[in-house]
Amino acid sequence: MTGIALPLSEVPLDLLDAVPGRVYDRSGQREVQFHWWHTPAVLPVQWCGRLRLFRWGSKHRRGRLPYGGWVTEDQVRQLAGGRPEPVMIPANLGHCRGTWFVISAGVRGVVLPDVPGGPVVYVLVRPSTNYYRNMTEQEPLMPVLVDQVI
């Protein structure tokens, strides 16, 4: 998954100011999109009772954080020194390889709260189902969705 979308009405205005140019119209409905390729790459996260934007993973191959925006459960265990905390990333649509798909409740993720530059969020992934692989042209990993499997 390389992007998510939320209805504009679900994103507080102060968060929109931090990420200009991400409001899109989908068949008359306005939404806010968050993509891995955006600069800065951020994701909305339910954190301490409110919606916040956190950096999405790391685009630096030689940093102390895992490269990319996704981690498996095994990688989360390796991040234990970084004290990863489970979070929910709200989304009603996900994006992977040109395909948008419906998300009913959100995406599971982990936040590393104590890193230089502020908290970082990673999307939790697992091996893809056959349906997800076919839908995304053989993507080997899929996001862990809240109470949903594609």
Image (cartoon, rainbow, N blue to C red):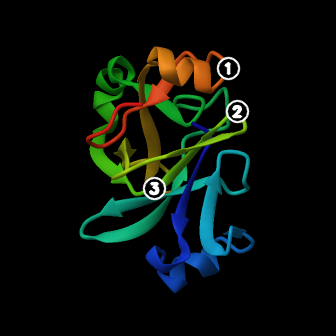
Give the CA separation, mark 1 to mark 2: 7 Å
Residue under the image location 34 percent in, 17 percent down: 74
**Disc 2 target residue:** 97
Q: Is residue 147 visible?
A: yes
Q: Closest to the observer: 66 or 135? A: 135
**Disc 1 target residue:** 137
Split into 4 quadrants, where in the image is the C terminus? top left
Place of residue 4 in the rendered image (x, y in percent of width and height, measured from the top left): 56, 51
The correct choice, above or below, for 13 with respect to 129 in the image is: below
Among all residues in the image, which is located at the extreme bottom?
Answer: 13
Q: Quadrant of residue 140?
A: top right
Q: Is residue 31 left or right of residue 122?
A: right
**Disc 3 target residue:** 91
Q: Closest to the observer: 4 or 36? A: 4
Q: Amino acid at mark 1?
A: Glu
The correct choice, above or below, for 35 with respect to 65 in the image is: below
Q: Earlier along the polypeptide chain: callout 3 or callout 1?
A: 3
The correct choice, above or below, for 9 with respect to 42 in the image is: below
Residue under the image location 66 percent in, 45 percent down: 36
Q: Is residue 23 left or right of residue 47?
A: right
Q: Is residue 23 visible?
A: no
Q: Kindly indicate whether the residue at mark 2 contacts the one at mark 1 (C-beta within 8 angstroms).
A: yes
- State how many labels appear: 3
